[in-house]
Amino acid sequence: MSITLKDVEHVANLARLELSAQEKTQLTEQMNAILKYADKLTELNTDDVEPTTHVLPVRNVMREDIVKPSVSVETAMRNAPEEEDGQFKVPAVLE
């Protein structure tokens, strides 16, 4: 697989980047060099290597889900500069 100038232009367009002709050429060469280097992995014998998603044995540490009392609406609203119908009232941020 190789990256073409058209591929670089397409990605630049998606990323809303304006690239000069020199930058496009340079990026095409750099990306192809990266792919060529990564292609060396195909030379390795990985038959006995177990697939992994992380180099370290990572696992989620979960706590027991226990229902606990929460702050009442009245207590929370005491800190609100403005309140309406039990909810914080904030200025609209619409364009």
Image (cartoon, rainbow, N blue to C red):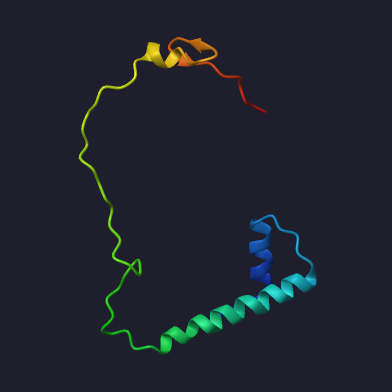
Residue 94 placement, left or right of 1: right
Against 29, residue 86 (above or below) is: above
| Quarter of the figure with residue 82 | top right
Place residue 56 in its image quadrant.
Answer: bottom left
Vertically, is 22 above or below 90? below
Q: Is residue 84 in view?
A: yes
Of 73 and 39, the residue lying toward us: 73
Quadrant of image for the C terminus: top right
x then y, percent, for residue 74: 39, 11
Count of numbered badges drawn on the protein: 0
59 sits to left or right of 94: left
Which of the two residues, 87 or 95, is positioned nearer the viewer here? 87
Relative side of 5 to 43, left or right: right
Q: Which residue is pictured at 34% across the width and 88% down the height?
A: 45
Name the quadrant containing residue 58.
Answer: bottom left
Task: Name the quarter where the N terminus is drawn.
Answer: bottom right
Locate residue 53, reporting x and y percent: 34, 66
| Image point (43%, 84%), residue name | 41
- Examine the rendering and report whether any part of residue 3 can be seen: no
Residue 40 image position (x, y, % from top left)? 47, 86
Give the image location of residue 6, x and y in percent.
Answer: 67, 70
Residue at 24% x, 26% y is 68
Instruction: Classify residue 46 as left or right of residue 90.
Output: left
Say if 79 sits above or below 14 in the image: above
- The residue under the point 75% across, 60% down is 18
Residue 48, compared with residue 63, is above or below; it is below
